[in-house]
Image (tube, rainbow, N blue to C red):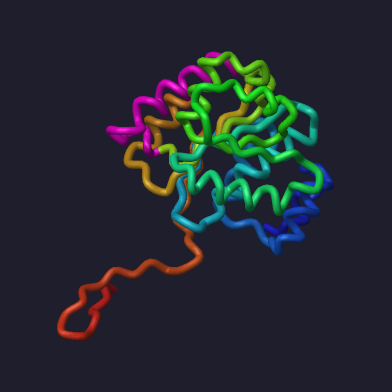
Amino acid sequence: MHLDTIKDKIPQELFEAIAASGVKELRPSQVKSVNAGLLEGMSLLVCTPTASGKTLIAELAAVSAILQKRGKAVYIVPLKALASEKFNDFRKRYGSFLKVSLSIGDLDSSEAYLSGSDIIICTAEKLDSLIRHHASWLRSIAVVVVDEIHLLNDAGRGPTLEILITLLRQLLPKSQFIGLSATIGNPEELAGWLGAGLVLDDWRPVRLRQGVYRDGSIRFVK
């Protein structure tokens, strides 16, 4: 699907920003997400391989909602380093017309300045803290993106993430939730718990081959 196909479905600034980044064709998972109601506010669980275009799916939902004056977007990641990377990427692409903020610091602060932000990138622990500090802007969130959502099964971060998503669904019953992952063993069950449609795809930009290395050579599985 050519990018022009969705030109009339998304705000002009978003279309121009995506086109300027070099995107001309939507990848299979992106097409499936659009067809599943991504641009109409449907919550989705997207399970596709690494580098298959999951982040752009989240961007389409988040930036559309912001430019359509429906509210803010939060992008939840598991690591501070990943949060910083997404912050730099989003600020480069959307910073000319949106306020992009990074919130990964002091867990004992409501960070009131975030009320003026459009996209907020944070860790699960930080957003959990913001909820507990009753940040005044929380109810203005229109889109919640949970990257690496399979970490619900992680012994360390899983419980915090599960409680966070549960609280957010109660706090924001009308918001759009987008879960992203490359590795989920029970996607149907997770989509049901999240109250989201399921997008599955196995396309990847580079073919994945399996083989056995022995004595200086690799024998690939046909």
Is residue 122 toward the left or the right of residue 149 in the image? right
Up-down relation of residue 152 to residue 5 (above or below):
above
Looking at the image, residue 148 lies above or below residue 218: above
The answer to whether one can see residue 85 in this image is yes
Residue 110 appears in which quarter of the rendering? Answer: top right
Residue at the location (51% across, 65% down)?
Answer: 205
From the top left corner, tell me how far across and down residue 142 is, in percent: 67, 26
Residue 91 place in picture, x, y as percent: 69, 48
> Is 199 left or right of 99, judged from the image as shown?
left
Asked if residue 169 can be seen in this view, the reply is: no
Residue 156 part of the magenta-drawn span: yes
Nearest to the observer: residue 134 or residue 165: 134
Point out the image quarter for the C terminus: bottom left
Q: Position of residue 171 (x, y in %)?
A: 57, 15
Foreground residue, 122 or 3?
A: 122
Considering only vertical position in the picture, is 19 above or below 11?
Answer: below
Dominant secondary structure of the residues highlighted in magenta in the image: helix
Quadrant location, the N terminus: bottom right
Q: Position of residue 25 (x, y in %)?
A: 67, 61
Give the residue furthest to the left: 215
- Report the side of 143 relative to 52 (left or right): right
Residue 62 included in the magenta stretch of the image: no
User: Which residue corresponds to the image point at 25% horizontal and 72% vertical from the top-left?
Assistant: 211
The region drawn magenta spans 150-173
Q: Is residue 215 left or right of residue 161?
A: left
The structure residue drawn at horizontal position 47% and vertical position 51%, both measured from the top left corner, is 201
> Total number of numbered labels?
0
- Residue drawn at x 56%, y 47% is 84
